[in-house]
Image (cartoon, helix red, strand yellow):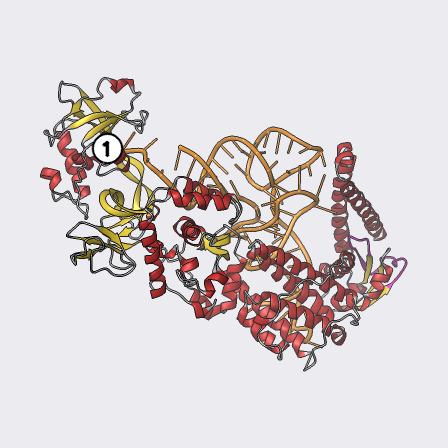
Amino acid sequence: CDWGRERFTMDEGLSRAVRTVFVRWFDDGLIYRGNRIINWCPRCGTALSDIEVEHEDVDGELITFRYPLTDDGAEISVATTRIETMLGDTGVFVHPGDERYAHLVGKKVRHPFFPERDMPIVADEAVDPEFGTGAVKGTPAHDPLDFEMGERAGLEKINILDGAAHVNENGGRFQGLDRYEARKAVLEELQNLGLVDVVERPYRHSVGHCYRCGTEVEPWLSLQWFVKMQPLARPAMQVVTEGRIRFEPKRFEKAYMDWLANIRDWCISRQIWWGHRIPVWYCDDCDAIFASMEDADTCERCGSNNVRQDTDVLDTWFSSQLWPFSTLGWPDQTVDLNRFYPTTVMVTGYEILYLWVARMIMSGLYFMDDVPFEDVFIHGIVRDFQGKKMSKSLGNVIDPLDMIDRYGADALRFSLAYASIPGNDMKVSEDRIEDARNFANKLWNASRFVLSNLGDRRPELDEATELTLEDRWILSRLDHTLDEVARELETYNFGEAMRDLYGFIWSEFCDWYIELSKLRQDQAAPVLVHVLDRILRVLHPVMPFITEELWSRLRPEAGTVMHASWPKSGGRRDPEVEAQMQRLQDLVVALRRLKIDHGIPQGRRVAVDVDPGGYGEEVAAARLSIVALARLESLELVDRLPPPGGAARTITAAGIEASVDLGDVVDLDVERKRLTARIAEAEAEIARAEGKLADEAFVAKAPENVVAKERAKLEEHKENRAKLTSQLQALGS
RNA sequence: GGGCGGUUAGCUCAGCGGGAGAGCACUGCGCUUACAACGCAGGGGUCGGCGGUUCGAACCCGUCACCGCCCACCA
């Protein structure tokens, strides 16, 4: 974060950007005022844009009732979920191709409460003949579709509700009732008149709610300001098609394109107190309407002083959409603007893809003539482990400050990064944060160990450093990890990067390398320093505090780790070394397990004979390591293992056999069971491999290396089975 | 109504064409001179169901089921 450039959308500079944009769009004909159906929240008393409305299914009612025709006894049935809106009906719509109603088009119906009202039956393509009765009551002031059809037919628009959703003077005897009371009262009256056919209840259907307070939104006719969106949407789609803006994950591209393709004009005026006031003035003398950069006290057209500013304010997203350039000083051509626009990446959650991201792209292209950013990285929302959004009313909120108090900021940060998968929600729990704290402790303790043996020396790794197998192994694993992490960060896979680092540091560096280094601390020092150095650098962005502290101890002269270069892999990856190390690890684990299986305390030292098969040199070179890690008394290399007597046997995947002298504690039954189980495992593997190789299609069509690998595995397991079987036989029965 | 995710070990999730993984939880052993917020070893899964493609499918395709999300002017 660059705290020197902190900004707020109501700052003076950003306010100037807002005005500039408004005036430009106004003068370019992209901002207009219109009396149209908008989403109205009766509780907040303001208009909302389409995307601020949250659709939710509710149990309502679907009522079918009849309008009598004026000229004869015929009637026409219509259906509605908002029966009270019939007070504002000024017509009935049917589909032009609907034969049932063809003979009625052009005739008129009579409103039961307003018999003098002119209510024609009109044909319009927008009617769905399949729904309900196929005839729609027309309420141009209270339904967006009816509004459009009403415009086409020239129907009167009668607004029957006030801003609080109470029936107004146009509602006759229902005046004063709120919309829900009116819903009941109107139904009752119609029933009394015998005009109601069907009351279907509950009728589950989707209803819009205010994003802020949850109140049911009322489609309401009112005078508002709009931005014409289609001219802005087209270029915004094009830059994505051309690849100038990329989404990660890519699937959000489709959502973005679909939204823009079907976009409708944006209602930007709000009847609330807080916000940028709309920079439009009205002249009471000549009726001019003009937008102005400066506060106006005279009319642009007639010079009159009788001007007043619009009292509405702008949707907060109107100023937010300018963020990528308004924060850099635009409309001035500042140094920052030239240097930092366009930016490289926009990191944000999917819930504001339309509200913010799409609009930044549109306004950026319009005013800067360039994209605001190249990559859009979409992450999820932080949720609890049940997948629920955190909310105070649910009581499932994990307070970050509380977690920081208890586990540290680094632990909280690591747990969030660890949970981050592009496009997915991040599920966090206190357990996970605790794990991250444990990881931080592990890093702390490992560093303490490394540093404790160094004193003031900082031996550095260079070409002259003599490297043992485990040195080359950990350096190979380090390079492997750095490569993986780099690749994952490139694609914003922070979670995978963290999991790789966690595994490398804990399971490889701490569990194996540090343990091995204890045998030869001085010689291992350059490698310990090197690996820890790289770990601290690469972990720093996620765990800044602990890494900075440890860095100051590892590199007291170097200054902040923030200024250290990002570590790159150093060409030390070596598959052969990793394979060798794997064979030794397998042997150590096999010996440890053998002791445990026979109930030998792990601390008790035992003598071991090893028949290394083809790996004599390797095992010999690693002898002291094996003795230390498996806690042995001694390890002798032999060509042939002694007869089983008071010994137990084990074997690794690579076919290295070992015999452990258990003295008088050996339990032959235990040993037989162990060997029998291992033979069964080998049998299963052999059966699997033989099955595959017996399949001619597999041998013929699978890649050569896959087949070869399968053959090698088969041989390996066969050898092991033979050795295990002879071990078992030697025990007798 | 349309679209997008998800369904893998008891829990939370990775893996997304060639021998099923992690953390937590669980079992046994252990104060081995960095770490018991730890170490060592282990048990545990017909990878949602059914079809298909392929020599080979947790992974690709189709379909169904159940969860979740987004969009939507069926009154």
Q: Residue furthest front?
A: A302
Q: Is residue A646 magenta?
A: yes
Tell me if residue A435 comes above or below residue A709 in the rendering. below
Q: Is residue A609 visible?
A: no
Q: Residue furthest right?
A: A639
Give the extent of the magenta segment.
Answer: A637-656
Residue toward you, A667 or B47: B47
Question: Mark 1, chain letter?
Answer: A
Whether residue A192 is situated above or below residue A595 in the rendered picture: above
State the image coordinates of residue A681 (x, y, percent, origin top left).
Answer: 74, 47
Tell me if residue A661 comes above or below residue A222 in the rendering. Answer: below
Q: Is residue A693 visible?
A: yes
Q: Is residue A406 left or right of residue A723?
A: left
Q: What is the secondary structure assignment of the residue under circle 1?
A: helix
x then y, percent, for residue A69: 15, 22
Q: Which residue is mark 1?
A: A150
Name the residue: 62% across, 58% down: A486
Q: In the rendered view, tell whether residue A247 sits above or below residue A633.
A: above
Closest to the observer, A645 or A3: A3
Q: Is residue A595 magenta?
A: no
Residue A83, quarter of picture: top left
Q: Residue furthest bottom?
A: A456
Amino acid bearing label 1 = Gly
Residue A387 x, y percent position in the rendering: 45, 51
Q: Residues within 10 Å of mark 1 (few under 14, many from 20)?
A: many
Is A386 left, or right, of A606 in this rendering?
left
- Lateral position of residue B8 relative to residue A132, left or right: right
Q: Quadrant of residue A476?
A: bottom right
In this view of the protein, which residue sits in the foreground, A471 or A146?
A146
Magenta stretch, main secondary structure class: loop
In the rendered image, which quarter is residue A586 located in? bottom right
In the picture, measured across the screen, residue A282 lies left or right of residue A466, that is left
